[in-house]
Image (cartoon, rainbow, N blue to C red):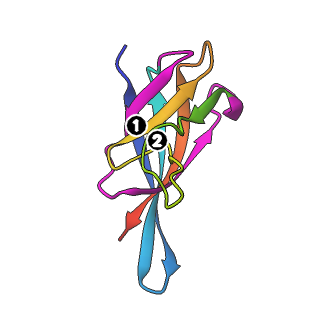
Amino acid sequence: MAITVSPTILGTVPTLPGVFVQRSVLNVSGLVAGASNTVPHGMLHSLQLVGVNGWGTSTGNVTLDNSQGYADGGGLRMGFDSTNVYLITAAGVTSCQLTIESGRI
């Protein structure tokens, strides 16, 4: 089954005077249960923050795969990059909801 991503843009919020980020929710389905999944986010701006929400599951059943994605200054991986979000799902979990903040607009 193909992974399907349905975005809902919540709007933009200021972080500093004249600097804004876009907040969105991504409903993700078609995940492979009990595995690492690569989810194409399709956002126009680089992601700044990704949160996993329980949607048909509890939050603890879907986590960011911190072995992949951008590395911060200390070498820790973020679980996402400019094109994908990397998720690990528990057995039986095939969908989730992500809350994201993307790029400075």
Q: Report how far apart the C-alphas of labels 1 and 2 lie in the structure.
A: 6 Å
Rendered view: 99 above or below 19: above
Say which element carries label 1. strand
On the image, the x and y values in percent for residue 88 come to: 55, 27
Which disc number belongs to residue 91?
none
On the image, the x and y values in percent for residue 29 come to: 46, 25
Instruction: Residue at 53% x, 35% y: name it.
Output: 65
Asked whether the beta carbons under mark 1 and mark 2 sit within 8 Å of each other, the answer is yes
Instruction: Residue at 59% x, 41% y: name it.
Output: 52
Please state if 80 lies on the left or on the right of 40 as rendered. Answer: right
| Farthest residue, direction bottom | 17
Comes first in the chain, label 1 or label 2: 1
| The stretch drawn in magenta includes residue 55 | yes
On the image, the x and y values in percent for residue 5 come to: 39, 34
Observer-nearest of 92 and 7 = 92
Rendered view: 10 above or below 12: above
Q: From the image, tell me which residue sits under label 2.
A: 26
Instruction: Residue at 38% x, 24% y: name it.
Output: 3
Quadrant housing residue 6: top left
In the picture, the quarter occupied by the C terminus is bottom left
Q: From the image, tell me which residue sits under label 1.
A: 6
Q: Label 1 is placed on what type of residue?
A: Ser
> For the magenta stretch, what is the residue range?
32-60
Q: Label 2 is placed on what type of residue?
A: Leu
On the image, the x and y values in percent for residue 40 come to: 35, 36
